[in-house]
Amino acid sequence: MNQKKKLIWQLVGFLFLIGAIIVGMVTILNRISGRQMEGTYIKKGDAAVLIKELAGSSFYESTVKLEGEEESLTYGEYEKLIDAWMKEDGRMDTIGREWLSSLSSRYKKRHYLLREDFLEFYFLAADQLAPELEIKQEELILLSGGQKVLDLEKNPLKPGQVLAASTDLSRVRLLHYEKGDGEITRVTAITTKEKLVMLLEKKPASITLKKAWISSNLPEAISILWKGYEITLEKEGFAYEERQVIGDIAFVEGKLSGITPYNEKINGKLLSVKENQMEIEGYGKLFFGEDIQVYKLYGENEDYQISDLKIGYDFTDFVLDGKEIVAALVTREENMENIRVVIKTTGFSGAYHEEIAFSVDTAFTVKGEGYEKRFEPGERVTVSKDSELFTSNRISILPDALTSRTTVYSIERGQGIPAYRGTMEIEKTDQGLLLINELLLEEYLYSVVPSEMPSSYPKEALKAQAVSARSYAYKHMLRSGLQSYGAHVDDSAAYQVYNNIAESEAALSAVRETKGQVVVLNGQVADTYFYSTSCGYGTDILAWKNSAGKEEAHLTAKNIGADCIETAEDMKQEEAFQTFIQSVGEGDFEKEEGWYRWSYCSRLDPDILLKQLQARYKAKPEQVLTKCGDGSFASKEISKLGEVKSISVLERSSGGAIHELLIEGTQGTYKVISEHNVRYVLANEGTEVLRKTGDKSKVSGMLPSAFAIVLTEGDEKVESYVVIGGGFGHGIGMSQNGARAMGNLGYTYEEILQFFYEGITLSKLW
């Protein structure tokens, strides 16, 4: 039996070998004899469309015109076209000649050119000549177009636009395609970022649009929301009556064939979003998949994401499939009055506590899942991970009175042992205990304003700080950066310092007199960044990242003073900034402040500098770049620096902050981008900064600002360096000491805010 199998496999192998030899011989004979290659040939009309897309219509019309759109392109015509292209554009010369040389052994001039050969070189040329177009061949699902699709503004697509999706339906985009017919089809196509250039293959699609919101249901058609678009689907005899439900919409051969609804819904306060789980009050933690959909069902249509869901509020219904969340339906978003704050450990060193000790100045209840326990006023409670109070992963501390204060003995702040308004939650996690303080936004500000600005500052400056802090906080309530913690902000300088300094009458008055007021730009609550002190100029958002949008137009670079001749743009020039930073601007509001001017001297230790570079690369790999052999810069792991040959400023942002710093070593050269990274790599722990007022201050991880010049000392290598700078902080938004000076000069808080945040208005939340 085994011998028989062996003979059969030997025979199969022999036949396979004979077949391969025959195919090879036929190919060789075809080439020798000049026989036409078999396959799909490129049509002249299709070649013309593709060439015009890449090289432009003017080039095509002025060189080789291909007559007869439906005829196949010959190799001879193709040779002339490539020759003309090489003469027109020198970048084509090398790759064009190499390509024609590789084809010459396979084609005679009379032969028709295979489409696959045309496209192979076409994509090579596209990468060389116009990589920004992103020309490629891809498979897509064309969903619909024209009047059948509404965009986020409820406008129908423009003529010649279609809604296209990847074949797994995970991504959608609008493409220009003049021949779109509205059918749901699967295509192979040549595309750019914004255009379907040419169809290679097309067939009706059998797909399922998962977790769509069926918004309306008429006798002849249904309308669905999916991936941010409203799509009208013809029923064509398909019977379905439900609406206002989530469902999977199935199509067979391009026709609507079935709808599977998800009918189970729940509602509750969203407590946290961690990885692939949401915790909902009353329901615990529920999983969700990558294809979860979020729909806003009120007001103007918006493309909502999980990050848009409001932590600490019950504005959303959750649609379930068993115990998995498949969709979130945002039914309303009223003005939010409560903020949730992560209370960090002593020194703001971390979010997770080993144990939490507290008491309340009134009677209170500790509540867990199916569990409640009463405590007397002042009774001290200590909670650890093993505490019997945990019947689930979360407990709440609920005082009997709205004006109660909870004192937390296990942490220390600048004021000593802090006490908190509102309620507390403690969540047990694998990393430790999270402490969340939920309280009224206005009461939160009572403790933010004195922690961020001395209460001795002028009243109008404190009021400006209150409005700025309220706007900053509300912006994070709208879109939390701490969803995994179940909070909107933490109590450290990473957001706004909260309850580090005790409440004061001046701060309370500033908050109350501006109750509910926020900074608004283009109808939306604006980003209101602030910092301690300017050098006489502020910078713009580009000091942090590569581009600024309309929502950041109010964060402009400017002189922070009066009667200044030089503009913030002038400060981008190295010579102008060097002159300015080594002098005093007579009109600068903060010229008497200690941090207005400072200097920093440091011995250069290459090993420390290398570690600083590596640390910032790990945090922001796209902003610490390595110089390559060809002179370009790329993001790559940093391993060597060697002796430092030079440190120089490559670029400044408006206002003068260092935006790009070049560090040249014998074993590596690096470009450091953004004011934050520059401040970090130039600072050595323990070195002191000399302030304008003659006193010294220890550096704690970063230089005071990036508004500085760098002077190096050493012959063959940099042995030490001096940084002469001004200001304290990032320099974006409102200078707090600038606001102080303006308050002393008689400016109102409205005028202060409009000075630092250009083009804004003030509006009330409630």
Image (spheres, helix red, strand yellow):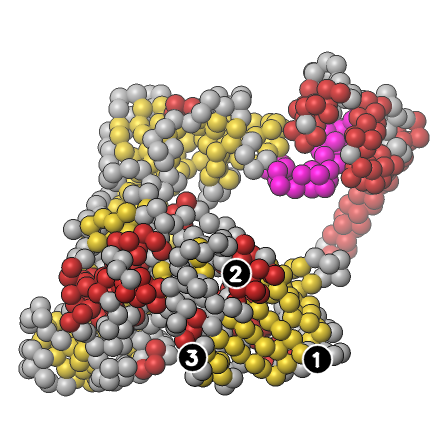
> Few, some or many C-alpha atoms within 10 Å of disc 2 (few <14, some 14-19, many ≥20)?
many
Residue 256 placement: quadrant: top left
Depicted 629 relative to depicted 93: above or below: below
Residue 481: x and y in percent read: 35, 60
Judged from the image, the secondary structure of the residue bearing numbered disc 2 is loop
Viewer-proximal residue among 290 and 506: 506
Q: Amino acid at mark 3?
A: Thr
Q: Given the image, on which type of amino acid does mark 1 rest?
A: Gly
CA neighbours of label 3 inside 10 A, class few (<14), some (14 to 19), many (20+): few
Q: Earlier in the sequence, mark 2 or mark 3?
A: 2
The N terminus lies in quadrant: bottom right
Q: Which residue is mark 2?
A: 656
> In the image, 148: left or right of 452?
right
Does any portion of residue 232 appear in the rendered image?
A: yes
Amino acid under disc 2: Gly
Q: Position of residue 281 (x, y in %)?
A: 20, 61
Where does label 1 land, which residue?
Answer: 714
Q: Residue at x 26, y 70 (%)?
A: 457
Tell me which segment is drawn in magenta: 111-138
Where residue 181 appears, as percent x and y from the top left, is 48, 21
Residue 255 lies left or right of residue 545; in this view the side is: left
Mark 1 or mark 2, which has the lower sequence index?
Answer: 2
Q: Secondary structure at mark 3?
A: loop
Image: 32 above or below 134: above
Residue 137 shown in magenta: yes
Give the numbered dot on residue 693.
3
Using the image, determine if residue 251 lies above or below residue 9: above
